[in-house]
Image: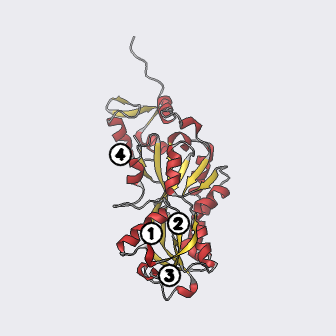
């Protein structure tokens, strides 16, 4: 007896699969060609059995995939922090820096993590790919103006990174994206720790770093423009960085993560970013990397 084809309603087109996975159609073709996604080729046309596809999406290929808590970890972003609450996502937050956040995600301790790690040719992709993660996708959140947050009375004295010599500077925790970028700038400008006056304590978030400067306890800190604006401080721009979300593929389709991502596409979220300043959301929601 010939094999009966399932009703057409149970098959998705390439375009529908691309929309479901939030990738470009070209990526769907590549996955099919490599045999990495359930599909059928019928009269020369690619069709994707919906049940098999959803089983593939939700497949528990790692021992921690179905046990991930609804936690957002990693680096702190003011817009993301606000969106988690405003969206009613129900996600818990643990902002502990890009490095610790990525390590925690790898161990299955969070559903998603925010990262902004500078690399030789960009941000985040090489670092994430090198971890050998499975069932994960890197989604663009925002590009942010990264630079120096400067005390108001030091704005004439600190106009470039090299002006930090002899100044009081807030330090970020090791492994944080801001700390990695700061160390990279120190090497580029041929400065070392002895050239700076270190401030006691460590700033664990973008808010903490700017708050120390605003309190008069430091002359400058590595930070982002939106925090300089919030505290009415000076800002010296140095780069536009990518702040991305690494998300577990199974957790991606859970209600908390979907509520956050849906809210990120809202007018309210984009208006908030514009009012905060220092954000470019042109690539928000784009897939920047997808694990095998």
CA neighbours of label 4 inside 10 A, class few (<14), some (14 to 19), many (20+): few
Tag 3 or tag 2, which sits nearer the N-term? 3
34 versus 194 height, above or below? above
- The secondary structure type at the circle numbered 1 is helix
Q: Which mark is residue 167?
A: 3
Tag 4 or tag 1, which sits nearer the N-term? 4
CA neighbours of label 1 inside 10 A, class few (<14), some (14 to 19), many (20+): many
Q: Marks 1 and 3: which is nearer the front?
A: 3
Whole-angstrom CA distance, mark 4 to mark 2, is 40 Å
Query: Are dots 1 and 4 in contact, CB under 8 Å?
Result: no
Whole-angstrom CA distance, mark 1 to mark 4, is 37 Å
What percent of the width, then of the height, locates residue 77? Answer: 56, 62
Name the image quarter holding the N terminus: top left
Residue at 46% x, 24% y is 6
Which image quarter: residue 194? Answer: bottom left
Q: Which residue is mark 4?
A: 26
Q: Marks 3 and 4: which is nearer the front?
A: 3
Q: Marks 1 and 4: which is nearer the front?
A: 1
Query: Are dots 2 and 3 in contact, CB under 8 Å?
Result: no
Q: Which residue is mark 1?
A: 182
Q: Which residue is mark 2?
A: 172
Tag 1 or tag 2, which sits nearer the N-term? 2
Whole-angstrom CA distance, mark 2 to mark 1, is 9 Å
What percent of the width, then of the height, locates residue 227? Answer: 58, 72
């Amino acid at each position: 007896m010939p094999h009966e084809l399932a009703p057409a309603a149970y098959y998705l087109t390439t375009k529908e699969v691309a929309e479901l996975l939030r990738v470009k159609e070209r990526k769907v073709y590549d996955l099919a060609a490599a045999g990495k996604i359930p599909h059928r080729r019928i009269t020369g046309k690619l069709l994707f059995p919906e049940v098999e596809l959803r089983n593939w999406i939700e497949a528990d290929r790692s021992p921690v995939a179905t046990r991930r808590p609804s936690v957002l970890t990693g680096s702190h972003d003011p817009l993301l922090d606000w969106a988690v609450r405003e969206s009613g996502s129900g996600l818990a937050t643990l902002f502990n820096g890009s490095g610790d956040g990525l390590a925690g995600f790898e161990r299955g301790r969070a559903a998603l993590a925010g990262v902004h790690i500078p690399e030789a040719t960009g941000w985040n992709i090489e670092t994430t790919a090198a971890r050998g993660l499975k069932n994960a996708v890197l989604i663009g959140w925002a590009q942010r103006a990264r630079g120096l947050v400067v005390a108001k009375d030091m704005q004439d004295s600190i106009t470039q990174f090299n002006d930090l010599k002899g100044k009081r500077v807030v330090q970020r925790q090791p492994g944080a994206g801001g700390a990695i970028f700061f160390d990279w700038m120190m090497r580029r400008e041929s400065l070392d720790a002895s050239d700076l006056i270190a401030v006691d304590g460590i700033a664990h978030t973008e808010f903490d770093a700017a708050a120390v400067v605003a309190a008069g306890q430091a002359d400058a800190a590595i930070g982002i423009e939106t925090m300089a604006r919030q505290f009415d401080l000076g800002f010296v721009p140095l780069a536009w960085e990518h702040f991305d979300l690494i998300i577990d593929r199974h957790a991606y389709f859970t209600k908390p993560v979907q509520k956050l991502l849906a809210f990120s596409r809202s007018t309210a979220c984009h208006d908030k970013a514009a009012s905060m300043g220092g954000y470019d959301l042109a690539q928000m929601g784009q897939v920047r990397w997808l694990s095998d």
